[in-house]
Amino acid sequence: MTPKAVFWDMDGTLVDSEPLHEAALIAALHSVGIAAPTNLHDRVLGIAAWPVYEMLRDEFGLDLPFDDWIVRKYDHYLPMAETLKPRPGAIEIYNELRALGVAQAVVSNSDRLVVDANLRMVGLFYPGMKTISRNDVREGKPHAEPFLRAAWLAGVDPADAVAVDDSVTGATAGLAAGMRTIFWPEAPMEGPPRAIIINSAEELRAELGL
């Protein structure tokens, strides 16, 4: 049965932006003379900008103030966003749910600047669209607050909503919000307990009753 509401993560779930974020991080680190760790992708997947900054500062000696660092990172990221592609099948499912009148929102740990840029680049931006960025909440994922805010904006009980996310961090947030949570990683991996693990858009369609 199709749920009353579906709340989507953005990076890696709706849009294939994780490689761009990683490339921007590496370029920004190189610009200040820091070699990126080989496991950078795994360590930052789904994590908001401030915890990533703290990790880079504490473990790798990044000595820029946060505001200077994030501008440097986005100076690298935003030009690359012009090449952004949607995750295969995801936006098609989003639009099908929209046509059915299912409430939806994009729930991201990225800053507002990136959320708006990414969604515009893949053509998923329209009047009345509900989006939650890291700037809109006190606590980012894995805290429940971003998904709970989406439920509040959509006027639905969290128990009647589905959260879709590609990271353990995000899936943990969806579960904490009391939502049925679908974990759709970019590569097969173990998900948090109680999450529904899928590996394709076809499986996602089935889980959403489409």
Image (spheres, rainbow, N blue to C red):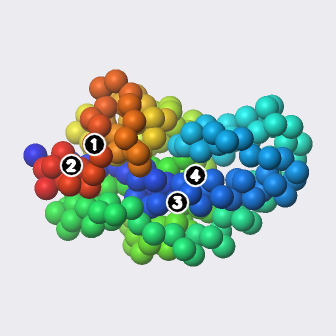
Q: Closer to the N terminus: mark 3 or mark 4?
A: 3
Element under disc 1: loop
On the rendered structure, is 135 left or right of 87? right
**Residue 135, x across and y down, in percent:** 61, 49
From the image, state whether disc 4 or disc 1 is nearer to you: 1
How far is the residue under mark 1 from the one under mark 2?
Answer: 6 Å
Marks 3,4: beta carbons within 8 A = no
Q: Which mark is residue 17?
A: 3
- 178, above or below 83, in the image: above
Element under disc 3: loop
How far is the residue under mark 2 from the one under mark 3?
Answer: 21 Å
Q: Which residue is mark 2?
A: 203
Q: Amino acid at mark 1?
A: Ile
How far is the residue under mark 1 from the one under mark 3?
Answer: 19 Å
Q: Amino acid at mark 3?
A: Ser
**Residue 121, x across and y down, in percent:** 50, 74
Q: Which residue is mark 1?
A: 198
Residue 125 visible in image: no
